[in-house]
Amino acid sequence: MDKYRNIGIKLTPQRIAIMDYLEGNKQHPSAEEIYKTVVKKFPTMSFATVYTTLSALRDKGNLLELTIDPGKKRYDPMTENHNHLICVSCKRIIDVPVAFSLDVPDSVKQGFNITDTQVEFYGLCPKCK
């Protein structure tokens, strides 16, 4: 519990269970997947608790909300800048912790001040090819 004290949200046993599930999780789970796992430990927990906890963690900068999958939001506890490999068949998402140097020409930027980049690579994972 001490490791979560300074994240800036109210800590309840349910929220701690959600954060424990996310810690080190590289599967990029959806809210539904998180709920299905954590509700086993807390049967009276609602889906709304999961969703509001994820929103609070995202708002505090402790979680990335990915919109890679058009069917559902996915969540990534790795908040450092990184990229992703996405399987177009099974929707598996893999972290790519490599920085790519991309330069957008001024003629295309239309005055934007670019502060961050994320590269998404789409293809078939080994299991789906």
Image (spheres, rainbow, N blue to C red):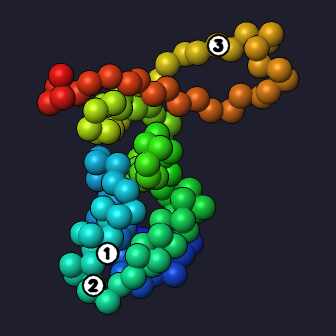
- The amino acid type of the residue labelled 3 equals Asp
How many residues crowd mark 2 within 10 Å: few (<14), some (14–19), many (20+)?
few
Q: Which of the two marks, 2 or 3, is nearer to us in this view?
A: 2
Q: CA distance from mark 3 to mark 1?
A: 41 Å
Marks 2 & 1, CB-CB < 8 Å contact:
yes
Question: Which of the two labelled residues, at mark 3 and mark 1, occupies the earlier sequence position?
Answer: 1
Q: Quadrant of residue 103?
A: top right
Q: Which residue is mark 1?
A: 17
Judge from the rendering whether residue 67 lies leftward or rightward of residue 16; answer left or right: right
Could you tell me residue 2's position as x and y percent? 38, 75
- The amino acid type of the residue labelled 1 equals Ala
Quarter the N terminus occupies: bottom left
Q: Quadrant of residue 115?
A: top right
Question: Where is 30 relative to 85, above or below?
Answer: below
Judge from the rendering whether residue 44 lies leftward or rightward of residue 121; answer left or right: left
Could you tell me residue 59's position as x and y percent? 60, 61
How many residues crowd mark 1 within 10 Å: few (<14), some (14–19), many (20+)?
some
Q: In the image, which disc is placed on residue 103?
A: 3
How many residues crowd mark 3 within 10 Å: few (<14), some (14–19), many (20+)?
few
Question: Where is 44 relative to 96, above or below?
Answer: below
Could you tell me residue 80's position as x and y percent? 48, 42
Q: Which of the two marks, 2 or 1, is nearer to us in this view?
A: 2
Nearer to me, 50 or 80: 50
Q: Which residue is mark 2?
A: 42
